[in-house]
Amino acid sequence: MGSAHTIQRGGTVTVTVPKVDLIDGAAMPQLGFGVFQVGDDEAERAVATALENGYRSIDTASAYGNEEGVGRALRASGLPRDELFVTTKLWNSEQGHDNALRACEASLSRLGLDRLDLYLIHWPMPGRGLYLETWRALEKLKADGRVRSIGVSNFTVEALRRVIDEADVVPAVNQIELHPYFQQDGLRAFHRDHGIHTEAWAPLGQGHGLLDDPALARIAEAHGRTPAQIVLRWHLDIGDIVIPKSVTPSRIAENIDVFGFELPRRRPPHRDPGIRHGSSRSVTFRAWGTSGGAGRVPAGCASRRCR
Ligand code: NAD
């Protein structure tokens, strides 16, 4: 774990967000803000609210259609560029060496930036056979200073292994679907072995089911926190980078207010089968992923290519 950024919020609340040291030496806030399925104007409002609440890392994508709104909010904030960490992603139709170079310039222009902090290949699309040459283009963008760090998203072990074996730069992150119902142990172990940081998308399970789980409600009650806060704390404890999304101001504030409490560590984090319960009241919580409704993979999980 690297440094941290500390933000004075509303004159009274201080938020300290830890940073992780990426394999290329860059430091990335461990908690950021996502804007999937948010329209351009709404993204502008939501990102403005997020920045006011202390978020400094924003995750968008060319496919989200809201890079311009994100860019407007970044400029309006008046925050120095080096306080911000901006990620965007190259869409499937933008793969290929020259296409990728053009796609990056187009994203930079829509965001109104001259450099990205992190640029990701959104999906590997192995059937098209283009991700390796696309990665070569990202290596060039990094060498040219248009992008500080480069990474991938939704890459399998097989696709990661090919990039590591055949290219020069190891992906700094792999952004994957990850939450207590879908813990991705094998992929996370591979990341750990190769210095790749795991970044969790859908960290709250996209708000469906997970946050209504009775076991989670009991843990939340025991800590005087909300279910979303417990889940985000769990991610932080296992070392994930997280980018929860909300357009609701109270939830945006709630989702960054996760640094003032701890969940007891009962096992080494990498062996944890699920959310640790921290109650001293001996409430029995099932191990997530082993019984009841837990451990289910949302239907269509692997095929939702349009994210
Ligand atoms: P998420 O897990 O962040 O869930 C967001 C939803 O959870 C919200 O729409 C809301 O319904 C609910 N929610 C948020 N805060 C809450 C709170 N405090 N209490 C109760 N409910 C709350 O899902 P996501 O948006 O899909 O993922 C986060 C980010 O990850 C995205 O915005 C995007 O930036 C990124 N992402 C990337 C990919 C990819 O393929 N790389 C795919 C999906 C998302």
Image (cartoon, rainbow, N blue to C red):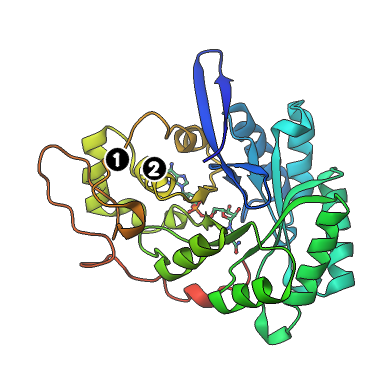
Q: Residues within 10 Å of mark 2 (few under 14, many from 20)?
A: many
- Quarter of the image for the C terminus: give it: bottom right
The image shows a total of numbered marks equal to: 2
Q: Secondary structure at mark 2?
A: helix
Please state if 249 lies on the left or on the right of 146 as rendered: left
Q: Which mark is residue 254?
A: none
Camera-side residue of 78 and 144: 144
Up-down: is 293 above or below 76? below
Farthest-out residue, left:
282
Front residue of this view, candidates 201 and 133: 133
Going by the numbered disc 1, the residue's amino acid type is Leu
Task: Give SS at disc 1.
Answer: loop
Residue assigned mark 2? 233
Pointer 2 and pointer 1: residues touching (CB < 8 Å)? yes
Where is mark 1, residue-wise?
263
Quick check: can you spot residue 95?
Answer: no
